[in-house]
Amino acid sequence: MNVDPCVMVIFGASGDLTHRKLVPALYEMFCRGMLPASGCVLGVSRTPKTDEQWREELLPWVREHAHGFEPGSWSEFSRRLHYHAADATRPESFPALSDRIRSLDADHHGGGNILFFLSVAPSLYQPIVECVQGSGLVTEGRRWCSLDPEQRSWQRIVVEKPFGRDDRSAAELNRVLGRAFEEESIYRIDHYLGKELVQGILAFRFGNTIFEPVWNHVYVDHVQITAAEPMGVEDRVAFYDETGAIRDMIQSHLFQILAFVAMEPPTLYTAEHVRAEKIKLIDALRTPEDDQIDRYCALGQYGPAPDGAPGYADLPDVSDGSTTETFAALALFIDNWRWTGTPFFLRSGKRMPRKVTEVVIQFKPPAANLFRELPEFKAGRRLMPNRIVMEIAPRESIRVRFECKEPGLEFQLDTIEMDSDFQREFKSEVVESYGPLLIEAMRGDQTLFKHRLEVEGAWRAVMPFLDDRSRGLRSGIQGNYPPDSWGPASSDELLARYASEWNNESVPKEGSQ
Ligand code: BG6
């Protein structure tokens, strides 16, 4: 599929996401020759500025956040960045904005294709989409592409998370989007799907023979999916206090990882087939009974640090008595033939000891230990169950743990781990995950974007942990885990209730001790 040229219209041009992620990602794609030869970006926000001022504003962000900054390529790329000041929530802004888009389309040979990106506060999604709908910019293939007489031009919209704040608001947002765009033109982005090793889960499972036969409840004891971050939420309180770890990380990113780890094999690697399997998987998640919520969930909030750093509750702008969770761990069960009885643990937290995003597939121990008479086992050692760890960040690696005979005259066992480090194996460079996803959107491939039903299903699955049913759990969460720890004691209890313990081991980087 070709990457079509387009005018990419970013609503929220002065925002953090545009600065930190979107423009650095587009620049990286430009440097790697992935962007189409023509087309441009139009940033839209309310503050008046010129194209040149916007480019100057972006430069330090790109320098800091893009891998491999180089002034020559920046000056070439930045000629494709333009700015338009407008309040995009007001219909009266759209005649001028539409004229600007059309004139840039002509100057940059965009072919009539427009990629809208909503990088604004979620409360603005609906008014902006309604204005876009009323503007006549969305022709849904009724106009021919000026660059290719065989093709019709397209208009697509990329929608950033949070996609709603509960099941109802997500369904409502889907209805609003659906009135303006066909489902094929709506790209619900989740930047975790742009991460190498998240996509790598599918390659690992379905590109090999030896893993899939044991990828089920008969062999897998439990699965852990962790996204831990050392930083707190200092500069994002306004957003975070309304959001919390379940909405911010679990319902979105961790559910996408869960779906890739647990779904059935799709018939083909296409958007239609992959997304159908994800929808089925999310649909099979068990809803805990109302009076059992605390058996399936642990919530926490970080307290003050010994060095005097404030706890979450003491941050300026956090509401009094806030019960927003900065840590959440859920135990989920999937009621289908493959996974019945195997718990999946999802956890995410701020102010954890280190950055780590990983999946741990913990297998059951061998049915019997025929080495039980060896001294080490008589002394109490047990066979270590096999384990596959897929580390998504900070390293990209897949590790497989197994028992082996330790070389020597004695028959003794030891546990070792095979470690495939993707940077080492492929000499690949890390790229900002938004870049590949934006290219996919320009290509018209929705495989790595979420379908309406996935999003609504994921909300339904987490609602018991968010609504009134979780009140009891929230009553005691203030300051209940120290910064730089792995969360509240209830998180360890949750895992111990169904399985064993969290994998908190860190693997030293190569060359370090
Ligand atoms: C974002 C969340 O979606 O993902 C942030 O809003 C979080 O709170 C971030 O820090 C984590 O992304 P990554 O790519 O650094 O793991």
Image (cartoon, rainbow, N blue to C red):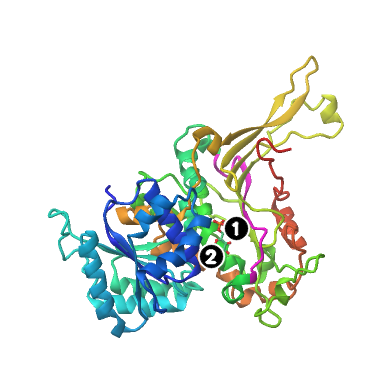
Q: Are marks 2 and 1 in contact (CB under 8 Å)?
A: yes
Q: Secondary structure at mark 1?
A: strand
Quadrant of the image where one finds ligand 1: bottom right
Query: Which residue is found at the position 56% from the left and 62% from the top?
Result: 249
The residue nearer to you, when weighing 291 against 63, is: 63
Number of marks present in the image shown: 2
Image height check: is 142 above or below 332? Answer: below
Image height check: is 113 above or below 358? Answer: below
Nearer-N-terminus badge (2/1): 1
Gap between marks 2 and 1, in whole Å? 9 Å
- Residue, disc 1: 332
Three-letter amino acid code at the position of disc 1: Leu
- Residue, disc 2: 461
Residue 231 lies in magenta, yes or no? Answer: yes
Of all residues, the one furthest to the top in this rendering is 409
Residue 385, x across and y down, in percent:
69, 37
What segment carries the magenta color? 215-234
Is the distance from the Cβ of mark 1 to the nearest ligand 1 atom less than 8 Å?
no
Residue 274 in view here? no
On screen, residue 364 versus residue 32, left or right, reads right
The residue nearer to you, when weighing 206 against 323, is: 323
Q: Secondary structure at mark 2?
A: helix
- Mark 1 crowd level (few <14, some 14–19, many ≥20, 10 Å Cα): many
- Residue 312 appears in which quarter of the rendering? bottom right
Image height check: is 428 above or below 358? Answer: above
